[in-house]
Each structure stands twice: as structure tokens, then as C-alpha cells.
Amino acid sequence: MKIAYLGAGAWGFCLASLLASKGYEIVSWTRNAALARQLNENNEHPHLQGHRRLDGMLFTTDLAEALSDADLIVEAVTTAGFRSVLESISQINTPHCPIVITSKGIEQNSGLILPEVAIEIFGEDVRSLIGILSGPSYAQEVIKGLPTSVVGTAYDSNTMLAICEAFTTKTFRVYPNSDIKGVAYGGALKNIIAIACGISEGLGFGYSSKAALMTRGLHEIRKLALAKGSKSETLSGLSGMGDVCLTCGSLISRNSRFGYLLAQGMTPKEAEKKIEMVVEGAYTCMSALQISRELNVSMPITEMVYKIIYEEMPPMEAVTRLMQRTIKEEHL
């Protein structure tokens, strides 16, 4: 099987390596010519030290070359760049093979989750080919073969099972889940809560504070996801609670680290520059707040994260506002 992998960041390189380890032919596309050249010369990935490309992996800046005769397309680009990459694909050819989305986000202004963006670009005829791989997973751990469990989902059950089969290894377990909306919203929204947890840690707060943020944050995620037609049980699974636990629990997460640096006094631009990777939660925060206001869904943690990032609210003031909110009975 030939797999076209779009994106050669840490997560893209990690999953491309996992697929190559199963004997698949991998042609990875990136806009970064220097990175493609570096990886083709068998040097290690800049964000995954000690890990070099495997046999069967090729890196190219030619999108048509990557897509040619592909049996599976996997993407790992930024949410902000997702639409433009798919539009470039559509100009070459309409896909006739499964498309696996591994990015986690919600498009700004349109409010669309990424599989909905794909349908808007490729048309309804391609809906049955679109799926998602999501769940609690760090590239640094997966590429080492540490035991990891995620979910595979799609609009079509056959596509969903094909995704699970393609990615499952002895150490990377992929559970099928038919709730594509719930998987998409869980994966996207947990990044916002991770920023909040990073801010909490940067301010010197303890585990009790983080536990409260994670629990109430998951409640926010569930409320918005349910309002958009997701299943509640999905948000209690790997792509919901599982991803919240991982991303919020460690500064390995770029989103948590971003929040930590904000609490230390850096501006959003300074923090993202230091991390050297895109912080998806900062992008999705704006999208989530737009949707929550349209649907009249209260998301106080998301709103405070937005105000810190985009309105320069001091983090301690945001904490004070959250703690002074009227207390209501807990409903989950």
C-alpha cells in the first residue's frame, strides 16, 4: 500500500514512521524544502532527536508526487493551513481513497470541524472516505514504541475499520468509534483547556487547581460538543477525557507549555516562537468562543483563555474572575 502523508512535523514524521514500520510505502509532502532534504539524507528529525527516517519513507515538496497512486491519504498540517492544503489537492485530483485527518482544531469564522471542511472542498461524494485518528498520544512516546491507545472514526464504517487496521501495531492500539463529531470536538477543544492548565502551573498553583480546570474544562467541552450533535459517551473516552488528561497533565504538550510561558510574562508571539511549533489551542480558542456565543453555551474557561491571548488580560485577573463567578449546582 502506498500512503501519501501530508505534513512532516513531529507528529507527521512519527505516524509516517509507524506506518513505514508496517512495510507501507510512504511519500511525505512538506512545503519545507530544507526539511525534506534533511530527512531524505537520513538525518534525524529536528523535533525528534535520535529518530531517523525508515526504509520506505520518501520526503518531497511535490504534492502531486505524494498523491500519485496513493491508497491512503493522511494529513498532519496546521488547522489554519488545512483548507489551503485540501484546495491544492482538489486542483490536482479529487481523492478516491480514504483520507485520514490527524490535525485537531476548528476552522475560524466558518466554525467547521476539519472533516466538514474536507466535505465542503471535495463534495458530498467524498464524505464516505473521510475519517479521523485522534486520542492521547505524544509523538516523542509513540515513536519509541511506548504503549498508546487512540480512536479511529469516519462517516462510513468500512473507512473507519480500514483506518484502524492501517495504524494498529503491537504498541499502537486503535479503537473504532463511529461518533466523528464527538472525536473531532474532543480533540480540538482539549487544547484550550491545556492552555488554561499551563497558565495555572505557570502561576504556581497546585494539583488541586489543575484537577478543577481539567474537570470543569471537560464539562465545557461536553456542553459544546453535545450542542453540535456529538454523543456524551465519546467525551468520556480516549478522544475526550483521555486527551484532556494527557494534554493538560504535562508540559510536554505545546499547548500547556504555551500557557505556562504566558503566565511567566511572555506575549503569545514570544511564547509560540520559543516553542517553535504551532499552538493549535490558541487558534481554536477563537473558533470555540464564536460557536459558544452563537449557541448560547457558557464556556467561562475558554473565554478567559481567549481574553488572556487576544485581549491582554493578566492571567491573575482571569483567575479572579473565574473564582468569583456565581456558584451553581454541579451538573455533568
Image: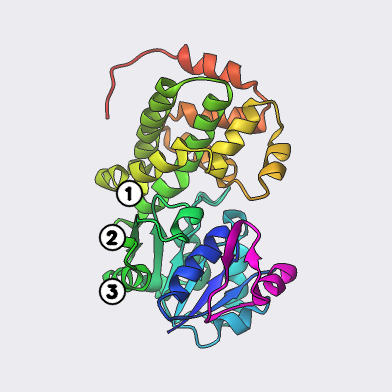
The answer to whether residue 89 is left or right of residue 230 is right
Residue at image x 66%, y 26%? Answer: 264
Q: Which region of the structure is painted magenta? A: 32-60
Residue at image x 40%, y 40%? Answer: 244
Position of residue 98 measured from the top left corner of the image (x, y, whole percent): 41, 75
Position of residue 14 measured from the top left corner of the image (x, y, whole percent): 51, 63
Q: Nearer the viewer, residue 269 or 57?
A: 57
Which residue is labeled 3 in the image? Answer: 158
Residue at image x 44%, y 26%? Answer: 210
Position of residue 198 measured from the top left corner of the image (x, y, whole percent): 54, 32
Which residue is labeled 2 in the image? Answer: 175
For badge 2, the amino acid type reads Tyr
Measure the alpha-carbon separation of dots 1 and 2.
Answer: 9 Å
Q: Quadrant of the C terminus?
A: top left
In the rendered structure, which disc, 1 or 2, sits on the residue that comes first in sequence?
Answer: 2
Element under disc 1: helix
Which residue is labeled 1 in the image? Answer: 238
For badge 1, the amino acid type reads Leu
